[in-house]
């Protein structure tokens, strides 16, 4: 069986890859398990050095990897280069901090005993990853886990097999032992058996909540540790004292990053009555100015959606919202050109329970809600089954922080775009998943925090 990757800007086949056969899958699992025995004993300083090498390789080949992302999933080329740079950053970050994060912690226990917590690796960890940040999401998992002494098995989304292979190459070139990081080109129907395999000790998934539930169910029945980073419908709250120039400019970026296909994109813009008209006018005008086009073109702001079926699903959500009584202020129809292009779109007057209110819209579609005041804004922001990120815009920083603390989300920003940063924990609550990636919390997810008592 072979897997094809297709350029969503043109519909042309980019490349063809052989699926991992059953025998090869068994070999790779065995190799991962064997390599773990050696890797767990490798001093953390050496693991850190190899991560620094990986950062170098990423920087040296940034153009090649960026073009691969642009071709396989349509990411605008400038954003793709930024993504490669961020992957190098997370490698450098753990190359610098892993030893400190993993150092034994002495805790006060019995006066005459030595009592410490040691952070020891678990084994091969399976990462099921999506196509939207095909390098970043993998490195966000791989850098802390390889530093911790685990080994990685990657089941990447089926539309980015080239990225999956290139990432394995990065680690091989960096000098990691064979089996430390292995790509499995398998379908999602083979995942349950891999999770259930005794050699695999944990699983992390970034993707839709449907896929998350399926994986969590299997991991739960196998009693294996899991981390889930699922979707979001992040609120972007604009209060009456918001710095309007920055709020509008950031709102555009926050909705359109990665052509709107980001879990932490702002999706529901919640604006108090006093500034609603000004915000909607300026936001729609700015969105209308953005350049939609070929992802390989340096001037492109918005590329195609990553797959035709994702565009169809997005448009279905827009149509259903309009049928329910929503208004379309901008865009709202797939573009009349080859490729999976959807224009920046603004929906207003979205009724409660319409898809744009209840579901995640994974594309360049912004829904704007009018609310009377701060209290109603917070209530609307939290009235969702998701809880990934949230932001609030106000000139009063104390007020902003107060509102941020009331958001039911894993990440809350005041006067800033919701973003991931290697130095800070990242993850959600509610249907956005559980567990944390990045920072110290991220490296301690798939470790055995072992209590050692020496009397
Ligand atoms: P999926 O959640 O289906 O895919 C993400 C990853 O999970 C892929 O590797 C996929 O493999 C795998 N997968 C899918 N179903 C299962 C399963 N039952 N068991 C194990 N693994 C599974 O996302 P889609 O690509 O279909 O996108 C659909 C929607 O998901 C988007 O519109 C968006 O709302 C959300 N999404 C959220 C992301 C985020 O960053 N939080 C990222 C991507 C999507 P395969 O590709 O082989 O099916």
Image (tube, helix red, strand yellow):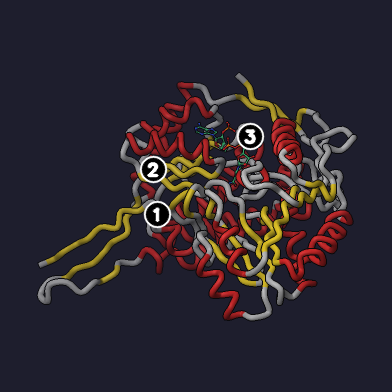
Residue at mark 3 to residue at mark 1: CA–CA distance: 27 Å
Q: Where is residue 170 in the image (x, y as percent from the top left)?
A: 59, 47
**Residue 202, numbered circle:** 2
**Residue 161, numbered circle:** 3
Q: Is 150 left or right of 4, judged from the image as shown?
A: left
Q: Is 348 left or right of 404, judged from the image as shown?
A: right
Circle count: 3
Q: Is 67 left or right of 29, judged from the image as shown?
A: right
Element at label 1: loop
Q: Is 258 left or right of 392, judged from the image as shown?
A: right
The structure residue drawn at horizontal position 81% and vertical position 45%, both measured from the top left corner, is 295
Q: Where is residue 109 in the image (x, y as percent from the top left)?
A: 16, 72
Indicate whether 47 appears above or below 13.
below
Indicate whether 291 appears above or below 68.
below
Between residue 358 and residue 184, name the one nearer to us. 358
> Of marks 1 and 2, which one's residue comes earlier in the chain?
2
Element at label 3: helix
Q: Residues within 10 Å of mark 2 (few under 14, many from 20)?
A: many
Q: How crowded is mark 1: few (under 14 residues within 10 Å), some or many (20 or more)?
A: many
Q: How crowded is mark 3: few (under 14 residues within 10 Å), some or many (20 or more)?
A: many
Q: Name the residue under label 1.
A: 445
Between residue 38 and residue 453, name the one nearer to us. 453
The structure residue drawn at horizontal position 39% and vertical position 35%, both measured from the top left corner, is 217
> Of marks 3 and 2, which one's residue comes earlier in the chain?
3
Q: Quadrant of residue 271?
A: bottom right
């Amino acid at each position: 069986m072979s897997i094809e990757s297709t350029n969503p800007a043109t519909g042309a086949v980019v490349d063809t890859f052989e699926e991992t056969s059953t025998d090869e899958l068994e070999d790779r699992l065995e190799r991962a398990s064997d390599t773990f025995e050696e890797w767990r004993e490798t001093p953390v300083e050496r693991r850190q050095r190899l991560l620094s090498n990986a950062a170098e390789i990423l920087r040296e080949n940034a153009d090649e990897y960026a073009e691969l992302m642009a071709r396989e999933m349509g990411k605008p080329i400038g954003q793709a280069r930024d993504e490669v740079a961020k992957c190098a950053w997370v490698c450098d970050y753990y190359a610098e901090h892993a030893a400190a994060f993993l150092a034994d912690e002495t805790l006060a226990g019995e006066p005459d005993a030595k009592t410490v917590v040691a952070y020891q690796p678990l084994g091969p960890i399976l990462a099921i990853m999506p196509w939207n940040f095909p390098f970043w999401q993998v490195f966000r998992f791989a850098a802390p886990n390889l530093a911790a002494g685990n080994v990685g098995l990657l089941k990447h989304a089926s539309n980015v097999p080239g990225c999956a292979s290139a990432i394995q190459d990065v680690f091989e070139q960096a000098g990691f032992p064979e089996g430390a990081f292995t790509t499995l080109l398998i379908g999602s129907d083979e995942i349950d058996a891999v999770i259930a395999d005794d050699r695999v000790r944990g699983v992390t998934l970034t993707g839709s909540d449907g896929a998350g539930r399926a994986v969590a169910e299997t991991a739960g029945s196998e009693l294996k540790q899991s981390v889930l980073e699922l979707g979001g419908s992040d609120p972007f709250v604009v209060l009456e004292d918001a710095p309007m120039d920055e709020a509008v400019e950031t709102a555009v970026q926050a909705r359109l990053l990665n052509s709107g296909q980001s879990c932490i994109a702002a999706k529901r813009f919640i604006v108090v009555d006093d500034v609603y008209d000004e915000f909607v006018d300026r936001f729609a005008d700015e969105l209308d100015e953005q350049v939609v086009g070929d992802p390989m073109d340096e001037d492109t702001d918005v590329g195609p959606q990553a797959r035709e079926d994702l565009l169809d699903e997005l448009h279905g959500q827009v149509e259903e919202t309009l049928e329910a009584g929503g208004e379309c202020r901008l865009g709202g129809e797939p573009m009349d050109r080859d490729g999976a292009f959807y224009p920046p779109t603004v929906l207003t007057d979205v009724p409660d329970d319409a898809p744009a209110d209840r579901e995640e819209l994974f594309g360049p579609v912004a829904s704007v809600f009018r609310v009377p005041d701060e209290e109603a804004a917070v209530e609307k922001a939290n009235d969702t089954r998701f809880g990934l990120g949230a932001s609030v815009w106000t000139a009063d920083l104390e007020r902003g922080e107060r509102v941020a603390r009331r958001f039911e989300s894993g990440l809350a920003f005041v006067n800033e775009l919701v973003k991931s940063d290697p130095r800070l924990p990242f993850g959600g609550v509610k249907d956005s998943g559980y567990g944390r990636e990045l920072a110290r919390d991220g490296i301690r997810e798939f470790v055995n925090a072992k209590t050692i008592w020496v009397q």
